[in-house]
């Protein structure tokens, strides 16, 4: 009974993960959700269970934010079942609260252990489930709808996200303002007076500007009649430029983008690395106010030996630090603070640049304000009034450590009093035009997201990164975000159908509800069901009204039939199908009105005009480059697996056809040396630099360079059951002993081949996790015997170890 239920659950999960078998509307309520390991190869759950088995107590040292609380309960779900049962009502679960990885913080946390916060964890669960269900439903529908109609969208996924889409909306809103902007001409009166020999002073007109040419000319005429400028008043006022508030995440992201040229996602990755290495405090915080018990002097003492700011730090310590300005206390973590000294050689590149800014900002919060004297001189020339303003620094304060914030040096103003007269040097009329706003910078977008409650300090970088990866915006010079045609059309389409899908208001309201869950003031299930019900209704209306967005798409993008270049013949109508290179690359038969997905991130070309024996489609060859993998595939089989043991997205190197010359059965050689289920398959197109590549991971084995012919033999190795290989060399280039030109043997076991084999990783693939000692499956897809009657190859232990040594 349990097995049957388990199989039913697995089938349901497979069904809901299959875009072709389920209505996206079902994802709002019917589809079950489950949590999975982000990287299953790390086997983290198993590791935690091994460590937790037989333990009496557990202390949770996760990041001290809502996401960290959520992970606490994921850890508990894994280890509580294997821990010793508590005696009576004994408390066995503890939570450590800390903000930096320093001896003091760790000891303090251990001496004041608390409990994990269930409400904060539930608020994260609610956010994750809402974003998953809403995002998947809208994304699946609009991706299938538009990619099935248009060929040059240039995006592999037309995604929707409750936070991502309003983020894009801000960028498109600015784009629309730029496009609709109409410049206006205006005129400014500018006067110059002599105050020293060969020196003049430029005065600003008090009216600022006028938009009527004739009126401007009138003011010019009457002002030009005057030969002198009379001083009406002179005011001197001491002013202060405030030192910055303590640093929080959003401000760090803004400055990193605007001043350091680093994207938000990249900045957070570096900040997290600096934190885990102990250089800075926890980098995710909304707080800009230090608690009263925070030891500011100890953090400052860490910086006394750095040549860039040692003098400033020593002066502060000897003269006394200024208490930082009172900022906002969000109750999460102290502001971002340097916790130990570092050098450029230690951190290097962007790591040092970010650390340097964090440190300078921290020191600046403890410095005095910058004080300066502002002098304002008012003049009258004829009937018109003009002004001149100058600033002189009295005390630089924090600008010593943050020189980019310093008061700019200005031309000194003349010493004068009321009633003094200066000769007028020049009065002229300047014609200017109003300018449109520029595209949003990342810093400005972050400000808008924070203002409207879109995302959290942890998720803001992710949302910005997503709209870039989806090709909705491009990052221009100055890190300005310019929307693409696709991004513009999508936002305009949402506005046309349901503006709330793109406006920040509804997401802001949801975030407030999620915060109430975290505070224990709202019910998790009620918030989840209510929000999903709202978006489900919006989804149905969106589906019914999609024609409104489609009208906009038609104007900007080309239909599939008019896109791409003829490449290979369809097996049904035998006409040429068009290869659409724009993401996601695919083949389209306009006669049959069928579209066939292809492998991404590589090149596609016709494969010798050879045809699949099953469906008569011409084969194509996918390649990731000369240093990577390549394999042929049948467009129809790739999308409609012909055998039960095949899945969608498998090429000929995984096809179990027993006799096809391109299949795994005919070209497979032996078990992969690295991954669990992969098979090393001969690449017949790779000569004369022959290679075999794993059909699951990125392992490539180069062998028999300059061989004339390499063929997989029907015979197998007696030692390891791998297929033997027949190699034929040209006599002039043969590396075989005794001037032989032909040899048949096992790639793994034959000593003749030992020096002719070299193991590498495909250049365009991510490195595989080197772990897992589970049972290895053979070359064929099934157990026991492979198609064609040959037994599955074993994993040759000694030779595999020898090959694996190439990685070290």
Image (cartoon, rainbow, N blue to C red):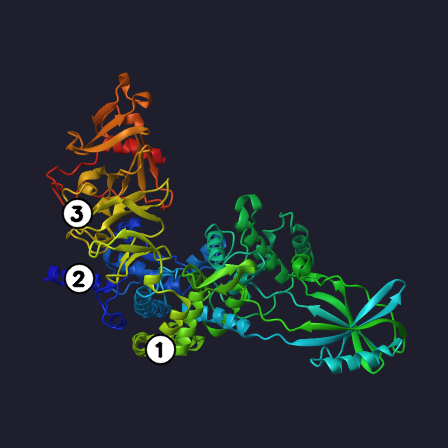
27 and 221: which is toward the camera: 221
42 and 381: which is toward the camera: 381
174 and 749: which is toward the camera: 174
Cα distance between the residues tagged 2 and 1: 35 Å
Q: x and y percent of residue 539 in the render? A: 31, 75
Any part of residue 507 in sight? no
* Residue appearing at x 37%, y 40% in the figure: 626
Mark 2 and mark 1 in contact? Answer it, CB < 8 Å: no
Foreground mark, 1 or 3? 3
The vertical placement of 681 against 287, above or below, is above
Identify the secondary structure beneath mark 3. loop
* Residue appearing at x 84%, y 66% in the figure: 200
First in residue order: circle 2 vs circle 3: 2
Q: Which quadrant of the structure image shows residue 486?
A: bottom left
- Residue matched to label 2: 11
* Residue appearing at x 12%, y 59% in the figure: 3
- Residue matched to label 3: 613
Q: The N terminus appears in which quarter of the rendering? A: bottom left
**Dot label at residue 683:** none
First in residue order: circle 1 vs circle 3: 1
Any part of residue 213 in sight? yes
Cα distance between the residues tagged 1 and 3: 62 Å
Identify the secondary structure beneath mark 2. helix
* Residue appearing at x 28%, y 18% in the figure: 739
- Residue matched to label 1: 522
First in residue order: circle 2 vs circle 1: 2
Q: Which quadrant of the structure image shows residue 29?
A: bottom left
The vertical placement of 452 against 410, above or below, is below
The vertical placement of 733 against 31, above or below, is above
Q: Residues within 10 Å of mark 2 (few under 14, many from 20)?
A: few
């Amino acid at each position: 009974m349990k097995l049957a239920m388990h199989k039913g659950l697995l089938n349901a999960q497979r069904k809901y993960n299959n875009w072709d078998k389920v209505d996206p509307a079902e994802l709002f309520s019917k589809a079950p959700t489950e949590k999975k390991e982000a990287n299953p190869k790390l086997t983290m759950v198993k590791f935690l269970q091994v460590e937790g088995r037989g333990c009496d107590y557990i202390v949770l040292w996760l990041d001290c934010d809502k996401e960290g609380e959520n992970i606490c309960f994921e850890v508990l779900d894994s280890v509580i079942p294997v821990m010793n049962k508590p005696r009576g009502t004994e408390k066995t679960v503890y939570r450590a609260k800390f903000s930096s990885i320093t001896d003091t913080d760790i000891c303090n946390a251990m001496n004041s252990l608390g409990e994990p916060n269930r409400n904060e964890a539930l608020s994260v669960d609610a956010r994750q489930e809402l974003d998953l269900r809403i995002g998947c439903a809208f994304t699946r529908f609009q991706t299938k709808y538009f990619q099935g109609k248009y060929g040059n969208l240039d995006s592999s996924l037309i995604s929707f996200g409750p936070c991502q889409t309003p983020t894009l909306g801000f960028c498109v809103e600015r784009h629309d303002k730029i496009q609709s902007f109409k410049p206006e001409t205006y005129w400014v009166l500018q006067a110059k007076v002599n105050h020293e020999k060969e020196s003049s002073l430029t005065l600003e007109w008090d009216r600022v500007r006028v938009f009527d040419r004739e009126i401007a000319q009138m003011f010019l005429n009457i002002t030009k009649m005057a030969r002198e400028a009379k001083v009406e008043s002179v005011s001197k006022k001491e002013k202060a430029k405030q030192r910055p508030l303590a640093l929080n995440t959003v401000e760090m992201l803004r400055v990193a983008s605007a001043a350091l040229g680093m994207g938000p996602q990249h900045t957070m990755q570096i900040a997290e690395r600096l934190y885990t290495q102990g250089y800075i405090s926890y980098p995710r915080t909304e707080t800009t106010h230090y608690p009263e018990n925070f030891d500011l002097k100890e953090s400052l003492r860490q910086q006394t030996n750095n040549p860039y700011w040692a003098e400033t730090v020593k002066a502060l310590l000897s003269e006394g630090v200024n208490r930082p300005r009172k900022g906002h206390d969000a109750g999460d973590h102290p502001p971002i603070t340097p916790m130990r000294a570092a050098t450029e050689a230690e951190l290097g590149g962007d790591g040092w640049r970010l650390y340097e800014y964090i440190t300078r900002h921290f020191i600046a919060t403890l410095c005095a304000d910058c004080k300066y004297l502002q002098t304002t001189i008012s003049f009258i020339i004829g009937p018109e009034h003009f002004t001149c303003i100058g600033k002189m620094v009295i005390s630089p304060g924090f600008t010593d450590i943050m020189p980019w914030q310093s008061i700019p040096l200005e031309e000194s103003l003349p010493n004068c009093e009321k009633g003094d007269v200066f000769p007028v040097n020049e009065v002229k009329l300047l014609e200017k035009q109003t300018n449109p706003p520029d595209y949003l910078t990342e810093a400005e977008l972050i400000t808008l997201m924070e203002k409207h409650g879109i995302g959290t300090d942890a998720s803001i970088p992710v949302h910005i990164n997503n709209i870039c990866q989806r090709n909705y915006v491009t990052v221009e010079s100055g890190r300005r975000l310019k929307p693409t045609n696709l991004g513009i059309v999508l936002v305009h389409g949402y506005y046309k159908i349901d503006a709330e899908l793109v406006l920040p208001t509804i997401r802001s309201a949801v975030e407030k509800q999620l915060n109430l869950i975290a505070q224990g003031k709202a019910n998790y299930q009620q918030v989840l069901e209510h929000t999903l019900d709202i978006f489900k209704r919006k989804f149905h209306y969106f589906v019914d009204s999609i024609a409104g967005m489609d009208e906009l798409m038609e104007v900007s993008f080309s239909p599939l039939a008019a896109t791409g270049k003829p490449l290979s013949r369809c097996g049904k109508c035998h006409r040429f199908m068009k290869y659409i290179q724009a993401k996601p690359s695919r083949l389209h038969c306009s006669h049959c009105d069928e579209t066939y997905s292809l492998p991404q991130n590589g090149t596609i070309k016709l494969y010798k005009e050879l045809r699949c024996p099953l469906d008569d489609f011409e084969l194509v060859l996918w390649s990731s480059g000369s240093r990577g993998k390549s394999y042929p595939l049948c467009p129809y089989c790739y999308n409609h697996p012909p055998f039960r043991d095949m899945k969608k997205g498998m090429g000929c190197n995984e096809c179990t056809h027993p006799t096809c010359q391109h299949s795994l059965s005919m070209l497979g050689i032996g078990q992969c040396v690295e991954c669990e289920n992969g098979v090393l398959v001969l690449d017949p197109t790779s000569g004369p630099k022959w290679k075999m590549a794993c059909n699951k991971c990125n392992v490539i084995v180069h062998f028999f360079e300059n061989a004339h012919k390499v063929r997989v033999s029907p015979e197998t190795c007696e030692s390891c059951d791998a297929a033997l290989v027949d190699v034929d060399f040209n006599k002039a280039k043969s590396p075989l002993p005794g001037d032989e030109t032909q040899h048949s043997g096992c790639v793994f076991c034959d000593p003749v081949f030992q020096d002719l084999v070299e193991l590498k990783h495909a250049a365009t693939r991510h490195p595989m996790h080197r772990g897992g000692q589970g049972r290895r499956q053979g070359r064929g897809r099934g157990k026991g015997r492979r198609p064609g009657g040959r037994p599955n190859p074993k994993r040759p232990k000694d030779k595999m170890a020898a090959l694996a040594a190439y990685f070290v």
